[in-house]
């Protein structure tokens, strides 16, 4: 299959391109598209064959459910058993936006889309191209992140091409995404609302609307015996090929320990890479040195994180060291992704 790559101005999508992309979906094909978080790999959420194709293209286990993306509130009730009050409240504040809500599904949503579960994850992305594409495709797009399973999520169309060229019909290139880590997932299907995956929308932001919100305990800990409630969170995601260690502690000490470890790895003939910040970059010595941005700006760090992990792969780094970041607020999402990339391998000093 030849994958067609088309550009779309993120704020002002081209109608002809959207129609072409929508037609691919209604005929059962797959289209990768930009959102405000990461690129998605879209198929018709109501067509079981499309969902099967998504799993096959990504090499993803089919027990890992997909998120259904919608563009308009009137499309919501048809895919939910009922629309909970909490969902309406959150949608009013955070949709369109980087929040995915899990509720009981209706019969319209095939089990192939929900990985066999009787719940469905739903999101309305805050991205004009994504919204127009969803509408052109009939209103319901099932989309995981558009990476092959186990690689960092794509933040550029070129990342999608690297992973999925020849396996899908089209890639819509809307430039670099704005946020850079996947949406917050909150489970509203039973009991207290619970965050299953941290993202741009933080616990504090959700609590302002709902009152008490729980956080799945597996999010920042690698040695929990509990299984995560979002099936996808159990896989070693976002992993670069190199062996990765996060070094946590006082900034000057972190630089010293990273440099020491880099020197030892180099001495054994291994290629070294360091993920650092603008503040520490001048002091780091390694084969490949990449700053994710200023320590003071967690949004900048989030936006660059996955691209840098991919670049370490391109550079064939054997050993990777990273600074640690604050896990407050949106920082929790950044640290969650970094910890998973490192397989929870943290050196505390
Ligand atoms: O920002 C995002 O959410 C991006 C863009 C493309 O929208 N999508 C994304 O999808 O990150 P994906 O498939 O890579 O991650 C979806 C996560 C997985 O961990 C999956 O297990 C979980 O959501 N999930 C989906 N449906 C679920 C359900 N019914 N119950 C529990 N977890 C669910
Ligand atoms: Mg993913």
Image: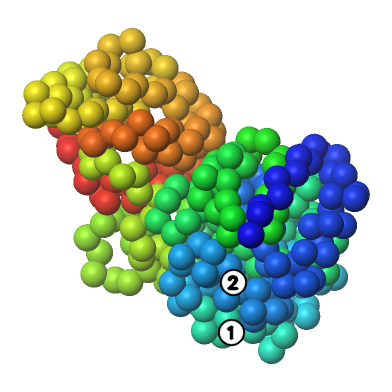
Q: CA distance from mark 2 to mark 1?
A: 14 Å
Location of the C terminus (image quadrant)? top left
Counting the numbered discs, the total is 2
The answer to whether one can see residue 3 in this image is yes
Q: Which mark is residue 280?
A: none
Q: Which mark is residue 53?
A: 2
* Disc 1 secondary structure class: loop
For image coordinates 42% across by 51% down, the residue present is 151
Label whose residue precedes the other's in the sequence (2 or 1): 2
Q: Which mark is residue 111?
A: 1
Query: Against 306, is 63 above or below?
Result: below
**Could you say which is closer to the camera, residue 321 or residue 277?**
321
**Could you say which is closer to the camera, residue 51 or residue 110?**
51
| Relative image position of residue 319 (x, y in whole percent) | 22, 35
The answer to whether one can see residue 71 in this image is no
Determine whether, in the image, residue 129 is placed left or right of residue 229: right
Q: Nearer the viewer, mark 2 or mark 1?
A: 2
Query: Against 221, is 108 above or below?
Result: below
| Relative image position of residue 222 (x, y in whole percent) | 26, 57
**Could you say which is closer to the camera, residue 34 or residue 267?**
267
């Amino acid at each position: 299959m030849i994958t067609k790559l088309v550009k779309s101005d993120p704020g002002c999508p081209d109608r002809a391109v959207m129609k072409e992309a929508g037609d691919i979906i209604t005929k059962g094909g797959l289209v990768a598209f930009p959102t405000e978080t990461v690129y998605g790999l879209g198929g018709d959420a109501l067509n079981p064959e499309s969902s099967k194709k998504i799993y096959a293209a990504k090499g993803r286990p089919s027990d890992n459910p997909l998120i259904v993306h919608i563009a308009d509130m009137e499309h919501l009730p048809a895919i939910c058993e009922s629309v909970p009050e909490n969902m309406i409240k959150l949608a009013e504040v955070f949709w369109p936006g980087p929040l995915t809500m899990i509720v009981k599904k209706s019969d319209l949503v095939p089990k192939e889309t929900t990985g066999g579960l009787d719940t469905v994850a739903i999101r309305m992305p805050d991205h004009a191209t994504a919204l127009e594409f969803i509408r052109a495709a009939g209103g319901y797009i099932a989309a995981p992140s558009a990476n092959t399973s186990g690689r960092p999520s794509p933040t550029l169309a070129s990342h999608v091409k690297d992973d999925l060229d020849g396996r899908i019909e089209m890639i819509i290139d809307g430039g670099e995404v704005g946020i850079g880590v996947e949406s917050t997932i909150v489970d509203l299907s039973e009991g207290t609302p619970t965050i299953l995956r941290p993202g741009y929308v933080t616990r504090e932001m959700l609590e302002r609307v709902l009152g008490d919100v729980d956080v799945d305990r597996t999010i920042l800990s690698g040695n929990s015996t509990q299984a995560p409630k979002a099936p996808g969170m159990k896989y070693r995601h976002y992993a670069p090929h190199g062996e990765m260690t996060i070094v946590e502690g006082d900034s000057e000490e972190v630089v010293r320990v990273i440099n020491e470890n880099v020197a030892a790895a180099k001495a054994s003939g291994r290629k070294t890479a360091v993920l650092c910040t603008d503040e520490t970059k001048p002091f780091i010595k390694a084969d490949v040195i990449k700053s994710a941005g200023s320590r003071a700006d967690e949004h900048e760090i989030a936006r660059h994180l996955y691209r840098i992990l991919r670049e370490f792969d391109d550079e064939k780094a054997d050993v990777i060291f990273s600074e640690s970041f604050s896990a407050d607020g949106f920082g929790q999402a950044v640290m969650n992704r970094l910890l998973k990339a490192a397989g929870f391998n943290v050196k505390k000093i």
